[in-house]
Amino acid sequence: QVQLVESGGGLVQPGGSLRLSCAASVSIFSIYTMGWYRQAPGKQRELVATLTSGSNTNYANSVKGRFTISRDNAKNTVYLQMNSLKPEDTAVYYCNAKRAVVATVYDYWGQGTQVTVSS
């Protein structure tokens, strides 16, 4: 069982920055794809960014050039650096760890952290 704990959310003004952290209970980055997702009120959860075990990254078009996903293997922690924040970035942000082995998908989620972008 993998536990993921997010932190770093909060209230920030438009144009500001935040860094989210996701601490994993065990060392999994070598075999799991890590991701950040978000869910705004009344909307479906959407992909923000992913980081594979091979260090390949993928970003939603809406955050490209503004957000950066990274990890610290020694700390079992994944980060999401968010710059130039916009009101439309307001959402609950969730950390995800996913791995597919043959026909079995291992899929773990954190509890979420609220990000509010407002003046």
Image (cartoon, rainbow, N blue to C red):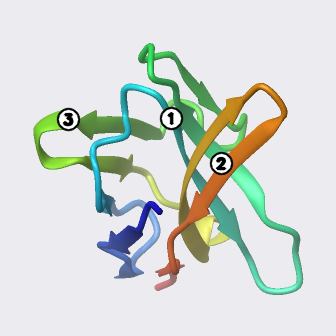
Q: Secondary structure at mark 2?
A: strand
What percent of the width, then of the height, locates residue 99?
A: 62, 37
Q: Residues within 10 Å of mark 3 (few under 14, many from 20)?
A: few
Sequence-first disc among 1 and 2: 1
Kind of residue at disc 3:
Asn
What percent of the width, then of the height, locates residue 66?
A: 47, 40
Is label 1 in contact with label 2 (beta carbons under 8 Å)?
A: yes
The residue drawn where x is 84% and y is 33% is: 103
What percent of the width, then of the height, locates residue 72?
A: 19, 38
The answer to whether 56 appears left or right of 74 in the picture is right
Rendered position, 54 above or below 79? above
Q: Please name which of the two marks, 3 or 2, marks the residue nearer to the observer.
A: 2
Q: Secondary structure at mark 1?
A: loop
Q: Residue 71's quadrant in the figure?
A: top left
Sequence-first disc among 3 and 2: 3
The residue under label 1 is: 32
| Residue 73 - label | 3
Kind of residue at disc 2:
Tyr
Measured Cα–Cα span from mark 3 to mark 2 = 20 Å
Is label 3 in contact with label 1 (beta carbons under 8 Å)?
A: no
The residue under label 2 is: 106
Q: Residues within 10 Å of mark 1 (few under 14, many from 20)?
A: some
Rendered position, 2 above or below 91? above
